Amino acid sequence: MRTLLAILFAALCGVAVGVATSWRDLRRLALDDLALAAPVDDATDPRRPELAPAGGPQPQVVVESTRFDFGQMERGTSRNHVFRVTNSGQGVLKLSKGDTTCKCTVSGLEKTELAPGQSTEVRLEWKADSLRADFRQTATIFTNDPQHSELRFEIVGRVVESIAVRPEGLYFEKIATETNQYEIRVVSGVYDQLVFTEWRCEQPQTASSFDVSWRPLTPAELAEPSLASLSPRSGQLVRITIKPGLPVGAVHQRILLATGLAAYPEVQVPIGGQVNSDISLVGPGWDERRGLLRLGAVSAKDGTSRRLTLLIRGPHRQESTIDIERTDPPELQASLGTADDRGRVRQIPLTVDVPAGTRPLSKLGAGHGGYGEIMLRSTHPDAPQLRILVEFAIEAR
């Protein structure tokens, strides 16, 4: 009997842990993730034009096609396709842009109103930089045609690589004062001789903390099983050295290697990482791994405020001071409170504000205005700078 009770108790504990974990994971969802998880009533989308009233002249949208296959696209290249939209009805056809998937953009919608018989073009652009080989991207155009209130255009294809980077990116964790070295293999199944002429960092602010060198891969290295699927004919072993001097927190960089090839002039190596020190940050909305503070959607009328805490440990905690070096954009404000020494940890309050009455803007990451930024300056010998990215959007409500 006791054994049965023990089993039942363990099962109940497992359920409780699972529920708690699920709730914790839901709390960690980003603003974009919540938009994907929550049901959306498309009928109330303010971008939709009002449907043509019954009994009056009716527009009629006609498209030659809504799907285009790019076939094979070289990774890193961009292409576009034009879809033609015609109004074959008797009323004015109204058009407006809806949503697109994350890697697709509507770069052209020449006209938003079409008289009977008129046509316009919808141009979709796509950059083949996804890690998946097969891609499918969509874009929505809203109309006032009651029979076809929205058009969903689709582009598909397959990403191929004349030059491949393995691993496809580099992630590191290091102490601020350390020097670390990593290796990347860049190979080609097309070119008999792959060489690099120079290198540079995409983000110049932290370029001085990186060094890059390379040498040709030997025949034995090209024959390694991990590269077999690429059938490499040539390649380079690239060594990336990460030196002291990076700001404490998350690091985002990209190494660009020039090839001298007209068809493939540059190879990109994305780098992400975390620089650790005796200084850390805690508080609601703070994602330490990404170095990102999520404020979410903010009302322009009300603004918002978030209080976090800087923690300083180690032998330099007493004499270390921290100041606000800059914030970007200026609508984002930050202030530091009075330090509180508690045993082996020194605590400094950090308040992040978006004041009421701030203009609407978006800082939701790549493709959505980038991120806001708070840069802190420190007298700590191992952490002269601390960089905080801020994700938020100010809405006019």
Image: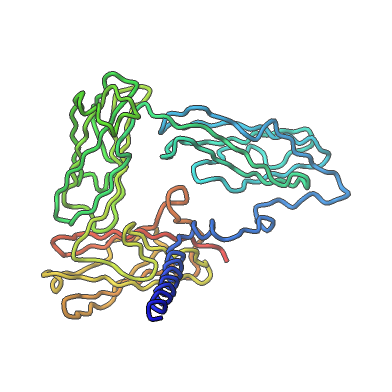
User: Quadrant of the rendered structure where residue 63 is?
Assistant: top right
Quarter of the figure with the N terminus:
bottom left
**Residue 200 placement (x, y as % from top left):** 26, 37
Q: Nearer the viewer, residue 224 or 237?
A: 224
From the viewer's perspective, is 342 left or right of 337? left
Q: Which residue occupies the extreme top position in the image?
A: 192
The residue located at (52%, 32%) in the rendering is 157
**Residue 326 placement (x, y as % from top left):** 31, 60
The residue located at (50%, 46%) in the rendering is 102
Position of residue 318 relative to residue 194, above or below, is below
Q: Which residue occupies the extreme left position in the image?
A: 315
Q: Nearer the viewer, residue 117 or 9?
A: 9
Q: Which residue occupies the extreme right position in the image?
A: 55
Q: Nearer the viewer, residue 167 or 340?
A: 167
**Residue 11 placement (x, y as % from top left):** 43, 72
**Residue 10 placement (x, y as % from top left):** 39, 74
Quarter of the figure with the C terminus:
bottom right
The residue located at (28%, 32%) in the rendering is 225
From the viewer's perspective, is 390 left or right of 178? right
Position of residue 126 relative to residue 96, above or below, is above
Q: Nearer the viewer, residue 228 or 275?
A: 228
User: Quadrant of the rendered structure where residue 4 is?
Assistant: bottom left
Q: How many marks?
A: 0
The residue located at (24%, 24%) in the rendering is 195
User: Quadrant of the rendered structure where residue 198 is?
Assistant: top left
Position of residue 86 relative to residue 150, above or below, is above
Colour style of the rendered protein structure: rainbow
